[in-house]
Amino acid sequence: MSVNPDSPLFQPFQIGALALRNRIVMAPLTRSRSSDEGVPPDFAAAYYAQRATAGLIVSEATNISAQARGYAMTPGIWAEAQIASWQRVTRAVHARGGLNVLQLWHTGRISHPSLQPGGALPVAPSAIKPIGQAFTKEGMQDHVTPRALSTGEVEQIVEDYRHAATCAKEAGFDGVEIHSANNYLLEQFLRDSTNQRTDRYGGSLENRLRFPLEVARIVTEVWGGGDRVGIRISPATENPGKTPLTSDVMATYGTYLDELSTLKLAYVHVIEGETQQTRDHPADVDFLALRKRFSGAYIGNNDYTTELAEKALAEGRADAFSFGRDFIANPDLVERLRTGGPIAEAPKQYWYGGDTVGYSDWPAMDGQIRIAV
């Protein structure tokens, strides 16, 4: 692989208030190592610190409340024990000169009663059952028909986002990323395929945008402005849940980005194509046109290589690029990309669940594990 070590990919770049050492971003990676109480393990600090040479680390998706949980063994950011554990992570990353933001997550209908407080039904904008299965401690279980939220409950979830954003600040993160992608709760409100409400949060595009924008405003307020707040979107993916795309993708997401620009968010993080599967997407989804609708930085995601990233950068299609699975087995991924070094591949058995094995014990190119576990 031919790599230019002086490529702009490996030069400093400013995103909002965040001074990145390069344009390589570690994408959020669900690793399912947290306790049932949503507390990340002590060894998460080593895992994240090992990858701190990335220009920016986006944490694994982190539940804003107990109700938000849709997968077993995922972390939270609403309780003191969770904050204390995340503080160990942020201190370790900062000690290596890294930057990390916390991704705020509510899964909505992509959940299961066994993951909910008191075995309750998952919540959603409308009572429409997703296709597929939930990852629970009892194994994979079929999704169920969720319960539609009342208007007042939607307002309460906005407050949950406020609390979680405040907790992320207390935990020492450099900012937050609002998870508005992958057909989780915010995107469930955005899409007319999953939002069939008749109150002020459903129906027209303005109404369907209302809840996600209320969340963005409240999070921005907590952080004193948008220069440390990003958002992730996925206009072209139907997974999880086999969720049909919204009927007018460009109008929906273009208007969304117009409104988010008024908040002066630092960046938009865009899954280009079908998440974890392909960069292919419907012809009517124009990512360059969406990029032009947003005033902040654009982080491209989904099966990027250095060659593809350099081409996109030269063409003005993106400002930075996030890599996901490659960071699992390559803690020094940035150096491997910069020098054309070998990219190790982690067997899927290590992706979700377990302990330090296949998590924080991957060596750098010279065979050394840089941060002790």
Image (cartoon, rainbow, N blue to C red):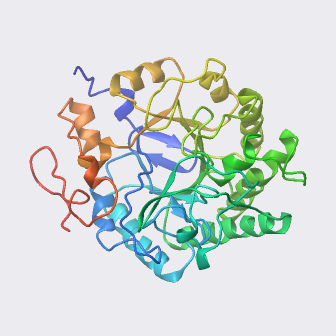
Q: Position of residue 343 (x, y in %)?
A: 21, 36
Q: Looking at the image, can residue 256 be seen?
A: yes
Residue extending farthest to the bottom is 80
- In terms of depth relative to the viewer, which is nearer, 341 or 184? 184
Residue extending farthest to the right is 199
Q: Is residue 218 left or right of residue 25?
A: right
Tally of numbered tags: 0
Residue drawn at x 31%, y 49% is 53
Q: Quadrant of the C terminus?
A: bottom left
Residue extending farthest to the left is 367
Residue drawn at x 21%, y 29% is 340
Q: Is residue 243 left or right of residue 29?
A: right
Q: Position of residue 158 (x, y in %)?
A: 74, 64
Residue drawn at x 24%, y 46% is 346
Q: Position of residue 68 (x, y in %)?
A: 60, 65
- In terms of depth relative to the viewer, which is nearer, 213 or 90? 213
Check the image and report above or below for 117 versus 104: below
Check the image and report above or below for 366 versus 173: above
Q: Position of residue 37 (x, y in %)?
A: 47, 78
- In terms of depth relative to the viewer, which is nearer, 348 or 43? 348
Q: Looking at the image, can residue 228 be seen?
A: no
- In terms of depth relative to the viewer, which is nearer, 40 or 145? 145
- Asked where in the image residue 295 lies, by quadrant, the reply is top right
Q: Is residue 363 left or right of residue 63?
A: left
Q: Is residue 18 left or right of residue 87?
A: right
Q: Quadrant of the N terminus?
A: top left
- Asked where in the image residue 297 lies, by quadrant, the reply is top right
